[in-house]
Image: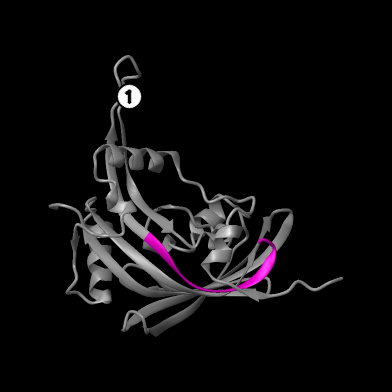
């Protein structure tokens, strides 16, 4: 049998292969779609689709922007704030069934939403209130099949669910998850130019995908203040991919 050739590619090849997704799809929840449509209707859609900020905090360091954004979103629940997280991605993933070496940046746009949906006339009188946190991945679409295997979804309950969502794996995917606490560790990130105090866990499980059983291990370093994963190493069978927080950009639209 001919051996598949391992190749190294950039985003051009990735875009051509991005249609090849596993059977477990990253879903855009109906309520989140409704929120996005409402924001578009209100004329403030660029909070999450435009990478430029209305008020960018240019004078702050990446770590200051990171914690300003995390506080605004997860503590203050400021729906005018967004936080862009950029993770350096390195390793090997399958793109169109071919093991492919990748070196790239993956962006997540984080924000809090809080919206009341009122029915139109002649419809039900029920008024719906929806609120929560969202993490929208932007670009690097070839990585979505891998994120599917880690349980990622764009509607999250806290910062720890970015990249790997343990509650979704156990509750929605019903995987038998082994968790090992690896201790406390100081992690220096070159892109952030900061040392983070982290708590480290090792997760291992098997998951069925496209008729095949994948063996997955995840080592994750969560910073201790908001439990944001600053470094994650995902191994699927023999293929390993590392995510490392490279930088953060905090934006605020209008007045608080």
Compare residues 172 and 191 and report the one nearer the observer: 191
- Taking the spot 56% from the left edge, 56% from the top edge, the residue there is 170
Residue 208 lies left or right of residue 177; in this view the side is: right
> What span is in magenta?
96-108
Residue 221 lies left or right of residue 4; in this view the side is: left
Relative image position of residue 109 (x, y in whole percent)? 35, 58
Residue 150 occupies which quadrant of the picture?
Answer: bottom right
Compare residues 104 and 175 and report the one nearer the observer: 104
Residue 169 lies left or right of residue 120; in this view the side is: right
Residue 194 occupies which quadrant of the picture?
Answer: bottom left
Q: Which residue is mark 1?
A: 126
Note whether 160 is above or below 25 in the view shown: below
**Residue 91 in view, yes or no:** yes
Note whether 18 is above or below 58 in the view shown: above
**Residue 150 in view, yes or no:** no
Residue, far top? 122
Note whether 218 is above or below 48 in the view shown: below
- Taking the spot 39% from the left edge, 56% from the top edge, the residue there is 135
Relative image position of residue 196 (x, y in whole percent)? 34, 80
């Amino acid at each position: 049998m001919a051996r598949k050739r391992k190749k190294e590619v950039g985003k051009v090849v990735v875009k051509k292969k991005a249609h090849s997704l596993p059977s477990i799809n990253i879903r855009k929840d109906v309520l989140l779609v409704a929120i996005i449509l409402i924001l578009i209707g209100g004329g403030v859609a660029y909070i999450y689709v435009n990478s430029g900020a209305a008020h960018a905090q240019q004078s702050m360091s990446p770590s200051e922007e990171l914690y300003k954004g995390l506080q605004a979103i997860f503590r203050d629940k400021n729906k005018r704030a967004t936080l862009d997280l950029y993770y350096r991605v390195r390793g090997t993933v399958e793109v169109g069934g071919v093991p492919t070496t990748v070196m790239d940046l993956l962006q997540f746009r984080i924000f809090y939403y809080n919206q009341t949906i009122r029915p139109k006339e002649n419809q039900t009188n029920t008024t719906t209130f929806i609120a929560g946190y969202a993490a929208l991945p932007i670009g690097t679409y070839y990585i979505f099949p891998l994120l599917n295997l880690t349980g990622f979804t764009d509607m999250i309950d806290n910062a720890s669910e970015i990249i790997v969502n343990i509650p979704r794996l156990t509750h929605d995917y019903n995987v038998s998850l082994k968790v090992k606490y690896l201790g406390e560790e100081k992690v220096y990130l070159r892109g952030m130019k900061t040392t983070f105090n982290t708590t480290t866990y090792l997760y291992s499980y098997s998951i069925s995908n496209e008729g095949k059983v994948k063996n997955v291990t995840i080592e994750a370093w969560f910073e201790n203040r908001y439990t944001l994963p600053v470094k994650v190493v995902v191994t699927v069978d023999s293929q390993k991919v590392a995510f490392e927080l490279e930088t953060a950009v905090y934006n605020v639209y209008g007045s608080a």
